[in-house]
Image (cartoon, grey):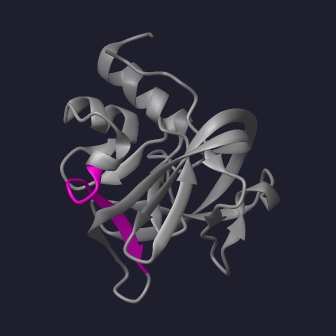
Amino acid sequence: EIDLTLCCIGSTSQVSTPRLAQTVCSLAEGDRILAIDLNKQNTYNTTVQKITKAKHLSMLRIVCDDKEFICTAHHPLYTEKFGFISMAKCANLLAVPDFSSLVGRVFIGLYDDNLAMVIFKPLSSVEVLEGVFETYNIKTDFPAGTYITNGFINRSWYAYVLFLRQSFGEI
């Protein structure tokens, strides 16, 4: 099963840049953000090639340790057991009835600025938010499409689709 629901991050998300974090809604094509090479544990400057906006009727508020991130249920986050996976897919794989059942069972990759590396922390809470949300997705020139938002390691939807195409053929 291939899940291609557009995955996005919330408008208040703070994207790490070479200087200071800035909200995703203030980024523009050509801006520099931080990407991460997970094999080497190094961060790199990458260029925003494209930003898309969409509206969603529900989002997830994900909390790990002291970090919070708002994204769609289909947005891929870096996890210890599954690599990049959405919370929707994770819940499906673990056969749990709801997102709150993932608490304590899923360890999320967070970038620790002081240690300059990814650490895994257990999911503290997941809350479904209902309403109309403006959301964003970022396409970068870094091939892996990874970037850091609110400390969480993300993969862009563009890179996720490219990965699926390379793994499973044209979709």
Vertical placement of residue 153 versus 75, above or below: below
The residue under the point 45% across, 70% down is: 43
Question: Between residues 1 and 170, which one lies in front from this camera angle?
Answer: 1
- Give the camera-side residue of 96 and 112: 96
Residue 23, magenta (yes or no): no
What residue is drawn where x is 43% and y is 10%?
A: 170
Magenta span covers which residues?
A: 102-112
**Is residue 136 rendered to the left or right of residue 158?**
right
Q: Nearer the viewer, residue 122 or 153?
A: 122
Q: Locate residue 163, reporting x and y percent.
A: 39, 30
Query: Residue 16 location, x and y as percent?
Result: 60, 70
The percent coordinates of residue 84 (x first, y second) are 34, 44
Is any part of residue 86 visible from this angle? no
How many discs mark residues in the rendered view?
0
On screen, residue 23 versus residue 59, left or right, reads right
Residue at 38 percent across and 60 percent down: it is 125
In the picture, the quarter occupied by the C terminus is top left
Q: Position of residue 107 (x, y in %)?
A: 25, 59
Vertical arrangement, residue 74 with respect to residue 115, above or below: above
> Residue visible at 72% across and 54% down?
11
Quadrant, the N terminus: top left
Residue 130 visible? The answer is yes
Above or below, comparing residue 61 to residue 95 in the picture: below
Rendering quarter of residue 149: bottom right
Question: Going by the image, does 136 lie left or right of 88?
Answer: right
Q: Residue furthest bottom?
A: 114
